Amino acid sequence: MKTLEKLASRIAAMCALLLLAAPAAAQNEAFQRQPLPAQLPAGVTVDQAKHLQALIDEFRFVEPLVVTKLKDNIYFARGGPDNNAPNMSFVVGRTGVVLVDNKNSVNLEKAVLAEIAKITPNPVIADIVQHSEHQSGVAALPAGVTIIAHQNAKRRMEESTERDRVPPSHIPTKTVGNDETMTIDGIRVRLLHFAPAVTDTDLVAYFPDQKVAFASTLLVMNFPLASTVIHRDLGGSVAGWLENAKGLLALDADMYVTDHGGVLTKEDVRTKLAFVQEKWNKVKAMIAEGKSLDEIKAAIPSVGDRKPTMVEDMYAELQSTGTASASSSASSRK
């Protein structure tokens, strides 16, 4: 009987492993396992490009919720059973817990709160909202929690009619501008809005004592090397994203936490910036040469990119601002 029980246990374990492996095998997306371009951006080595591509390759749209300790009192809650669940994090203070961003459903946020309770009896006292999208998990927080966001995020969350709209009871209670440092329960954090990027609500949460920067959707691993998410309909800007990436690199940080994916190093962020910057420069130069969007798209492939592609976003932005045309005119006068 014991032999049969052991055999049944082993079979069950093998089935569980197969079930876990099956989704992973099925989630090889078009942006994953792409060959490196023949010519890399200036300053980027093959090893650096391979490392960033490997981080993209290991991304999964569906993965178990896993909470890991990053440093000292900082924890990272990655993934969750919901499709494309955003990451969130939390910092344990003297008497309370500060959340950094939220999950995209109440149930998943509650799952993170349950994990926090296993680590500390301290209650959640504050929540830093890093952008106005997929914040519906915030509704799981108890009354009285201080909800902090950029001033633009509060406005957009108040106006939102999307599926993930936030109830009036959980609209941000404290807003910040473009650069504000505060101490919450002994935790020092600097909140930065370098420029509109993914949206006009993006907020970087930088913890200088631990040298950790939470970038939210400014850094995501579910896009190709030379692409990222930009919501132009929500005030997003590729030029602003480039400014944000440079701002992130200027911080004295050695960990950069993404919204979708894992944790990056400063070198990873520098590599990502180099790829996007190179594409921006190419699109800008081709517009100045009078090339059409179709000609630019033919010259700069967008394998694995979403619609609208990064090339399309760049083209629309450069055309609307007249940046490329102004650059071309200035060159012709020299």
Image: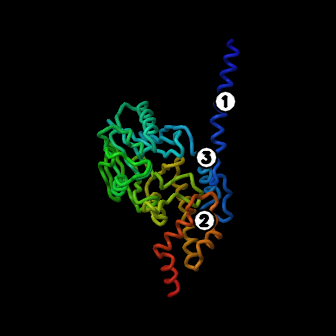
Structural crowding at the residue carrying mark 1, measured as other residues with C-alpha within 10 Å and reported as few (<14), some (14–19) or many (≥20): few
Kind of residue sitting beneath label 1: Cys
Mark closest to the chain's N terminus, 3 or 1: 1
**Mark in the foreground, 3 or 2:** 3
Report, in whole angstroms, how far the alpha carbon at label 3 lies from the one at label 1: 22 Å
Q: Is residue 40 left or right of residue 192?
A: right
Badge 2 marks a residue whose secondary structure is loop
Residue 15 - label: 1
**What residue does disc 2 label?**
41
Badge 1 marks a residue whose secondary structure is helix
Residue 255 visible to an observer of this rendering? no
Image point (50%, 79%), residue name: 325
Q: Is residue 201 above or below residue 78?
A: below
Quarter holding residue 287: bottom right
The percent position of residue 79, horizontal first and vertical second, equals 52, 42
Looking at the image, how many numbered discs can be counted on the residues?
3
- Which residue of the protein is positioned furthest toward the top in this rendering? 1
Q: Is residue 272 left or right of residue 171?
A: right
Structural crowding at the residue carrying mark 3, measured as other residues with C-alpha within 10 Å and reported as few (<14), some (14–19) or many (≥20): some
The percent position of residue 69, horizontal first and vertical second, equals 47, 39
The percent position of residue 194, horizontal first and vertical second, equals 40, 61
Mark closest to the chain's N terminus, 1 or 2: 1
**What residue does disc 3 label?**
58
State if disc 2 and disc 3 touch (CB < 8 Å): no
Q: Is residue 113 above or below residue 163?
A: above
Kind of residue sitting beneath label 3: Glu
Kind of residue sitting beneath label 2: Pro
Q: Nearer the viewer, residue 170 or 175?
A: 170
Residue 232 visible to an observer of this rendering? yes
